[in-house]
Every structure is written in structure tokens, then in C-alpha cells.
Image (cartoon, grey):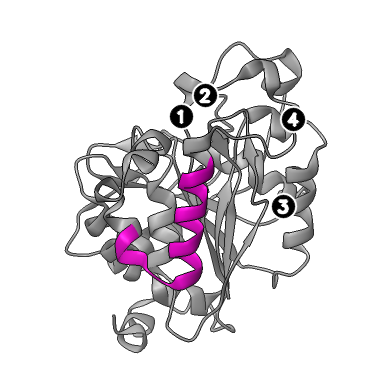
Amino acid sequence: MNTLNDLHKISSTFSNTEKMPVLFLGHGNPMNAIEENQFVAGFRNMAKTLPQPNAILCISAHWFTKGTKVTAMEMPRTIHDFSGFPKELFAVQYPAKGNPELALETSQLLLPTEVELDHEWGLDHGAWSVIKHLYPEANVPVIQLSIDYSKSPQYHFELAQKLSALRHKGILIIGSGNIVHNLRLVDFYNMDIDNYGFDWAIEAREKVNSYLLGGNFQALIDYEKHGQALQLAIPTPEHYLPLIYTLGLKEKQEELSLFNDKLLGGSLSMTSVKIV
């Protein structure tokens, strides 16, 4: 990873800044977009610690594609990619601008990986339902980078490293998903119990947190090799891979901290990560 050379590849559209933090946000239920709870408060409190970004690049669990794409429209639409929720949630709009220049720069940084400039997608709820709590005025441009479902966690970790130069141009990079995310096993009758997890979910969270805080990212990349608890926590990879992007951007001297680190409904976690 040669950040200096990569910086020279980025046009003067983006002025040099102090290095931006990197985030992984456990986004949870789409209702977090309109409800008031401890996790929403956690997002807001964390946002107070961030420098003002020039733009946001979000890697969301909900844009899982063949190949890699980046949104390149001027005004991304707010996508309500869910069903069965109250009309108030479908009425929410997050009118942040896009940034076609940043989309193009991102595609060039990721070469030789081919990145399609996408004009159809927009902002899915993995992006807007949490970003709206960080920047409620929608005054920071947002683009999304898709996750290629045909590639391995190791591939995604290495691809993320190529985005490092953007951090020096005022770009806040956010992964949005959930580390423990088994919807088939959610205990919907006990969603209101604070920090409630099944035994395997507790074990998975403890193991992942130990790897995170200990800097053992290879174990997190190779999560499928690390026991039944992690296999239950991560039955499919789409909500987990945004974490891998965040970890790929951590530099050696940087600190990693956790917030919103609680279980929910037995089989979900809201654990979020800040790297600075």
C-alpha cells in the first residue's frame, strides 16, 4: 500500500486533509432510522468526535453484486429496500448529494479491479439509516461501493487497502452491516431485553472482540475456520464483509475502539468500530 503514490493519482478536486477516521457501524433494524434508542444515541455521540468530512464512501451490506460498482450520480435516491414496516419509515428521505468525481477517483484507485460507475442504485438503508444520525442535515455527499459476492474476505481486505489515500482527502469511509447477524434465529419476543444474546452469540461476540482489540485481523478474515459460534453468527457474509473493509484500512499505529457493543434479540449484535 503506497499512500503517497495513490495521493498523486487523486485529482486536485479533493484538498489534502488530516487523515480521517474509519468506521464500521452495526446498523441493525431499519427502524433505527426513526426510533430513539441507545444505539442511535451511540451513533450521534460518536459523530461528535469526527472531523467534518468532504464526502462519505459507504460499503453497505445491502449492495451485494456480481463485480464491483460505485454510485456515480449527482443525486442518489433514497432506497427503501425492505417491507413490512410502518409508512413513516417509507416516508423518510435522505437527500444527500452524490459525488461523481469521487466515484471516478475511487474506481481509478481500485485498478486493476474493474469498477462500474453506477447511475441506478442510490443509497440503501444500510447507508442512509445510520448516516442520517451522523449528519442529519444531509450536508455531506455520499457514494456507495458495492461488495462483490464472488470474492473472498481476503480479497475484500486487500481491495480496501487501496482506498487508503482517500482518508487524506477528507473522505470518511464507513462499513455498514452487523457482525452477529442470524435473522432466522432472532427472538422477536425478547427484543426489548438489554444486551440479550444466545450462548453462541455471546461466544461469537467475545471471540470477534478479542480478535479486533488484539489486532488479529487474519482470524477475522478466516472466520469460517474459527468455530461453530462464528458460523452461526455469520451464516451469510454480506453483513460481515463491511467490517473487513474497515479493518483493511487500519494502519499499524492507529487505535481501534468499540461502541454500541451489545447483543440484540438473541442472534444480532450492534457492535460498531472506530479506527483513528
- Residue 264 to residue 9: above or below: above
* Amino acid of disc 1: Asn
- 217 inside magenta stretch: yes
Residue that protrudes farthest toward the left in the picture = 112
* Amino acid of disc 3: Phe
Q: Position of residue 78 (x, y in %)?
A: 59, 32
The residue that mark 1 highlights is: 182
Mark 1 or mark 3, which has the lower sequence index?
Answer: 3
> Mark 4 or mark 1, which is nearer to you?
4
Q: Which mark is residue 193?
A: 4
Q: Is residue 255 left or right of residue 261?
A: left
- Disc 3 and disc 2: Cα gap in Å? 21 Å
Residue that protrudes farthest toward the front in the picture = 199
Mark 3 or mark 2, which has the lower sequence index?
Answer: 3
- Disc 1 and disc 3: Cα gap in Å? 22 Å
The residue that mark 2 highlights is: 81
- Disc 4 and disc 1: Cα gap in Å? 17 Å
Cβ–Cβ under 8 Å for marks 4 and 2: no
Count the labels in the image. Answer: 4
Q: Which mark is residue 119?
A: none
Residue found 38% across the figure and 34% down from its top: 232
Q: Quadrant of residue 160?
A: bottom left
Where does the magenta region start and end? 202-219
Q: Which mark is residue 43?
A: 3
